[in-house]
Image (cartoon, rainbow, N blue to C red):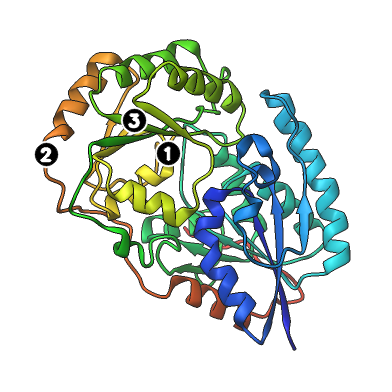
């Protein structure tokens, strides 16, 4: 019997990681891909990146509201839940596949759980203590039946949350397979900057922080490319300041929409990535590109030797920049394994997994 596999994507960021898996499902005669698109994919403000998805789409869940507050995120969550219930009632999937920690994805996961649709979760077990996404991610873990993690540290965390080790698989990082083809030993004279709000804070953005970053960027005598922040609380205010800053400085450009392959090609030739994006933790080290990781948003994620943490303080930023500016990063030590066939292994495991009628039992790790 053909298995109907619903896969949800919320932004260009997660679609870049999920696209290969989606293609494998689409090409598999034993499966039917049900692609659900939501979040910033459907927002012109964030690039309307649904246009980069060259595959049949089963449903669109439009939920973002034109506001920049925590209240807006709460409303968007509710809107996503209402729409997801109608979508699942119509397409009736056998599985829901979700990656990561976005609130839009968790809304879909919550409804799937309520409607007894089994969930396969990719990238559980991570911690990002500077972001509210931590709660979405761990909650998704508890509602999911299958777990596909990036390394053994994350696998142990998922098990510690009460998940049976027989259902937790370390197949490596789904987005790193084949990334080596983008590597370049030639670095051009530019830096990539991505800054997201630290949403765990009561005040998720501050003029002081973003202006410290802008003043630091002004000191760098090279081309700067900003990638805008996604649709978190505070993202719009940050993006407005960045775009205004770029209008006054010819050495600064802003990217709203970059397909993953274009971004990786671009990142591989940068002197460094600056900010607090997860791609500075995962993709950049694989490309031998150093990361100046600022603040707490990525706290708890496994670090590579090319990641340099610092606070949003000018003296510390300058010291870290001088440390990486003239250094060679041809070697990188990381605990995230390079494993081939990650997407294929995930699909094969989902296809052969049968859900017991009595659900799952809490696994006591101790």
CA distance separating discs 1 and 2? 22 Å
Query: 361 and 66: which one is in front?
Result: 66
Residue occupying the point 52% across, 68% down:
20
Is residue 318 among what the camera can see? yes
Q: Is residue 301 left or right of residue 70?
A: left
Which residue is located at x 57 percent, y 72 percent? 23
Q: Secondary structure at mark 2?
A: loop
**Looking at the picture, does residue 55 appear above or below residue 15?**
below
Indicate which disc, 1 or 2, sits on the residue closer to the N terminus: 1
Q: Earlier in the sequence, mark 3 or mark 1?
A: 3
Task: Out of 296 and 280, give the one closest to the viewer.
Answer: 280
User: Badge 2: how crowded within 10 Å, few (<14), some, or many (20+)?
Assistant: few
* Residue wearing tag 1: 277
The label number, if any, that marks residue 327 in the structure image = 2
Q: Nearer the viewer, mark 3 or mark 1?
A: 3
Q: Could you tell me how far apart the alpha carbons at marks 3 and 1 are, in whole angstroms?
A: 16 Å
Mark 2 vs 3, N-terminal side: 3
Q: Is residue 328 left or right of residue 314?
A: left
């Amino acid at each position: 019997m053909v298995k109907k596999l619903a896969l949800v994507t919320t932004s260009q960021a997660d679609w870049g990681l999920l696209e290969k898996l989606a293609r494998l499902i689409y090409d598999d005669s034993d499966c039917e891909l049900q692609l659900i698109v939501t979040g910033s994919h459907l927002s012109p403000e964030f690039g309307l990146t649904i246009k980069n998805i060259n595959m049949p789409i089963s449903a669109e869940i439009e939920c973002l509201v034109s506001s920049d507050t925590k209240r807006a995120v709460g409303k968007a969550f509710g809107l996503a839940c209402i729409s997801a219930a109608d979508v699942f009632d119509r397409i009736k999937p056998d599985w829901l596949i979700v990656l990561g920690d976005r609130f839009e994805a968790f809304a879909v996961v919550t409804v799937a759980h309520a409607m007894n649709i089994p969930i396969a979760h990719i990238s559980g077990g991570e911690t990002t203590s500077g972001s509210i996404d931590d709660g979405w991610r761990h909650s998704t873990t508890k509602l999911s039946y299958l777990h596909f993690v990036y390394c053994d540290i994350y696998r142990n965390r998922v098990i510690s949350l009460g998940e049976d080790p027989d259902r937790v698989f370390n197949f490596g990082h789904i987005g790193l397979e084949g990334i080596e083809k983008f590597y370049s030993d030639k670095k051009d004279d530019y830096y990539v900057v991505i800054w997201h709000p630290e949403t765990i804070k009561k005040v998720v953005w501050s003029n002081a922080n973003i202006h410290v970053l802008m003043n630091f960027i002004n000191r760098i005598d090279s081309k700067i490319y900003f990638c805008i922040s996604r649709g978190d609380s505070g993202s719009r205010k940050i993006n407005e300041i960045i775009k205004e800053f770029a209008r006054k400085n010819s050495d600064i450009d802003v990217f709203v929409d970059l397909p993953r392959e274009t971004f990786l090609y671009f990142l591989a030739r940068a002197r460094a990535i600056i900010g607090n994006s997860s791609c500075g933790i995962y993709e950049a080290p694989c490309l031998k590109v150093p990361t100046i990781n600022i603040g707490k948003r990525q706290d708890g994620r496994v670090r590579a030797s090319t990641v340099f943490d610092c606070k949003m303080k000018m003296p510390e930023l300058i010291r870290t920049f001088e440390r990486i500016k003239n250094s060679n990063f041809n070697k990188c030590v990381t605990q995230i394994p390079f494993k081939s066939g990650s997407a294929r292994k995930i699909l094969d495991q989902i296809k052969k997994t049968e859900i017991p009628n009595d659900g799952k039992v809490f696994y006591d790790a101790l």
